[in-house]
Amino acid sequence: MKRLLLALLFLAGCTTPQQQQQQVVVSSRGYDQAMQSWIGEDINNLISVWGAPKETFKMPNGNSLYTYVRDYGSSSSAMGSQYGNFALAQSQVNQCKTSFTVDKKGIIKVYQFEGNACVNPEKH
């Protein structure tokens, strides 16, 4: 068993410089890149992939706004002293809100997003 573990550790360390450079980076930039691919697409294609939006709004100019909100739960952390005389709790909601502006023909023209969970792998 020890030999197998050592062999696996050895093989895991045998990566080429190219493999090391191709690390996956997940960021809001990657999310922006992914959203760019929806510009010019029919809103029906988006709905078939993402499902029904949380909100829709008909704008005065005839365009429509489709809004998706993804909640990924919340995370919290706590700190205190070794003597236990104080504690600091912090909670953070992990959410991504994405809106698409669609013209009268149903074509996605603009998007915007906000939230700490709007991340995706970056394309190189």
Image (cartoon, rainbow, N blue to C red):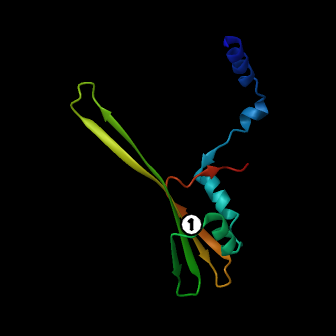
Q: Tell me the element at label 1.
A: strand
Residue at image coords 66%, 64% = 49
Residue 40 image-quadrant placement: bottom right
- Give the residue at the far left of this rendering: 85
Residue at image coords 73%, 48% = 124
Amino acid carrying label 1: it is Gln
Report x, y in % for residue 7.
Answer: 73, 17
Relative vertical location of residue 46 with respect to residue 34 in this rendering, above or below: below
Relative vertical location of residue 82 with respect to residue 89 in this rendering, above or below: above
Of 52 and 23, which appears nearest the observer? 52
Report x, y in % for residue 107.
Answer: 68, 77
Relative vertical location of residue 14 with respect to residue 86 in this rendering, above or below: above
Of 3 and 63, which appears nearest the observer? 3
Residue indicated by mark 1: 112
Drawn side of residue 33 relative to residue 58, left or right: right
Report x, y in % for residue 122.
Answer: 67, 49
Residue 77 image-quadrant placement: top left
Residue at image coords 52%, 87% = 60
Of 1 and 34, which appears nearest the observer? 1
The quarter of the image holding the N terminus is top right
- Give the residue at the far front of this rendering: 1
Report x, y in % for residue 85.
Answer: 21, 31
Residue at image coords 59%, 83% = 63
